[in-house]
Image (spheres, grey):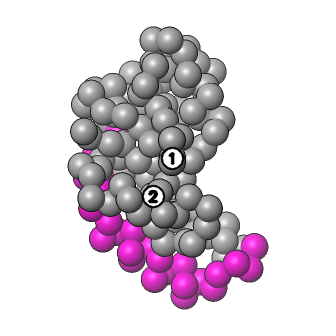
Amino acid sequence: MRIVIDASVAVKWVIAEAGSEAADALLNQDLMAPVLWLAEAANSLWRRVRLGDITAEQAGVRLSGLLEAPVASLPIQPYLERALRLATEIGHPIYDCLYLAVALHHDATVVTADRRFASAASRPALEGRVRLLGE
């Protein structure tokens, strides 16, 4: 089964936190994501630096780890129109809907640690397309 991961899952590969084990278990799957995942994950690392959780050097090392992760990073252009339609239909930001658009196009499932996103995508027409990490 193909899995689309979002940044909330990827960050758990390089920051030990709740859900890290479940995220690690996905590493042997066929993973893909819109290339946006890297920018979102890097932003999360930046936030950790700002909060004092990690140093800038540690963030750089962790970003290097993410760049080597076994994820097929896909360009966003082919999925933008569908993501925009999804965003307007479910009332959720287009950033997350890009992951969903990729999953729908490739007959895959999005795995996320973002409860708000999973809840927004829980409509009958999208049933089974987004699941929470660990479920």
Image vertical order of residue 126 relative to residue 9, above or below: above
Question: Percent from the top left, x then y, of residue 70?
Answer: 27, 61
Residue type at mark 1: give it: Leu
* 72 lies left or right of 64: left
Tell me if mark 2 has few (under 14), some (14-19) or many (20+) residues whose alpha carbon lies within 10 angstroms of its own: many
What kind of element bears circle 2?
Answer: helix
What residue does disc 1 label?
Answer: 133
What residue does disc 2 label?
Answer: 23
Residue visible at 54% across and 25% down? 121
Query: Magenta stretch: residue 65 in it?
Result: yes
Q: Which residues are magenta?
A: 51-76
- Quarter of the image for residue 51 reads bottom right
Q: CA distance from mark 1 to mark 2?
A: 7 Å
Question: Percent from the top left, x then y, of residue 106?
Answer: 25, 31
Q: Are marks 1 and 2 in contact (CB under 8 Å)?
A: yes
For residue 111, the mark is none
- Is any atom of residue 6 visible in this view? yes
Question: Percent from the top left, x then y, of residue 27?
Answer: 32, 60
Query: Magenta stretch: residue 39 in it?
Result: no
Image vertical order of residue 58 relative to residue 86, above or below: below
- Quarter of the image for residue 98 reads top left
Q: Looking at this view, name the residue that lies furthest to the right.
A: 51
Residue type at mark 2: give it: Ala
Considering only order in the chain, which callout, 2 or 1, is on the residue closer to the N terminus? 2
Q: Nearer the viewer, residue 73 or 120?
A: 120
What kind of element bears circle 1?
Answer: loop
* 52 lies left or right of 132: right
Question: Percent from the top left, x then y, of residue 15?
Answer: 55, 72
